[in-house]
Image (cartoon, rainbow, N blue to C red):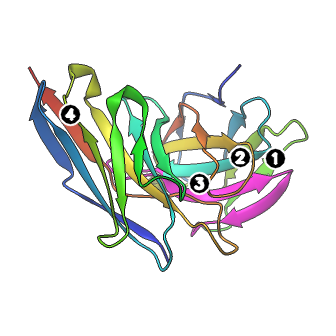
Amino acid sequence: AQSVTQLGSHVSVSEGALVLLRCNYSSSVPPYLFWYVQYPNQGLQLLLKYTSAATLVKGINGFEAEFKKSETSFHLTKPSAHMSDAAEYFCAVSPNSGGSNYKLTFGKGTLLTVNP
Amino acid sequence: ETGVTQSPTHLIKTRGQQVTLRCSSQSGHNTVSWYQQALGQGPQFIFQYYREEENGRGNFPPRFSGLQFPNYSSELNVNALELDDSALYLCASSPKPGGNYEQYFGPGTRLTVT
């Protein structure tokens, strides 16, 4: 069974500082990986996804993530935080082989706060 | 292009009652997935529908059931509501059921069971 671990349920950064949100996955084969953002009282919006192409993936709003197979990681970064980045971020995994290639398995989320 | 919509936005039910939640998928999408998001948790997969058939199911009891209609909209039905069913229920649509296809999420229905 696949699983996702997000290290740090709450990350706080200053405006303009680097954002680093950590995600590690457990899977027998490299899966598809996703980062979603959820603003208060809203659904989830896809930031970026890894589907076996380039290991460095660029997404919306200046975010990017690097797939590292040796570390089973898919950490999300942004060079300079904006106040508007404050939200909950979820890492998710979906298998890329086998019959169960339909569901997303989410981590527990990381709440990002940005201080002025 | 209209995104994924869900109704109602909020709902309050009593333990033991039944509830139906509705979802309209994005235009051109034939696959709908439902997720339950408890407070402070990540979404948990309930089931997926593809072309009106259940295409997979998570670890939820049979009192959670669903339907998909010819226009690819969907319903989630929950019978015999329990207090632990209180959560945000998210619907997501995608062009196809494969894991590499992006799932587009609706705003959710907040269900409170008292």
CA gap, disc 1 and disc 4: 43 Å
- The quadrant where residue A86 appears: top left
Please, which chain is the residue tagged with disc 3 on?
A: B
Q: Mark 1 points at which residue?
A: B68
Q: Nearer the viewer, residue B7 or B18?
A: B7
Asked if both marks, 3 and 2, belong to the same chain, the answer given is yes
> Dot 3, crowdedness within 10 Å: few (<14), some or many (≥20)?
some
Q: Which amino acid does label 4 sit on?
A: Pro
CA gap, disc 3 and disc 2: 27 Å
Tell me what residue is drawn at x 86 percent, y 50 percent: B51
C-beta proximity under 8 Å, tags 2 and 1: yes
Magenta segment boundaries in residue numbering: B37-60
Q: Name the residue under label 3.
A: B16
Q: Which of marks 4 and 2 is in front?
A: 4
Quick check: A10 left or right of B28? Answer: left
Of the 4 image quadrants, the one containing the C terminus of chain B is top left
Helix, strand or loop at mark 2: strand
Q: Nearer the viewer, mark 1 or mark 4?
A: 4
Tell me what residue is drawn at x 37 percent, y 48 percent: A90
Q: Which amino acid does label 1 sit on?
A: Gln
Q: Mark 4 points at which residue?
A: A79
Asked if both marks, 1 and 4, belong to the same chain, the answer given is no
Q: Where residue A25 appears, x then y in whole percent?
A: 37, 67
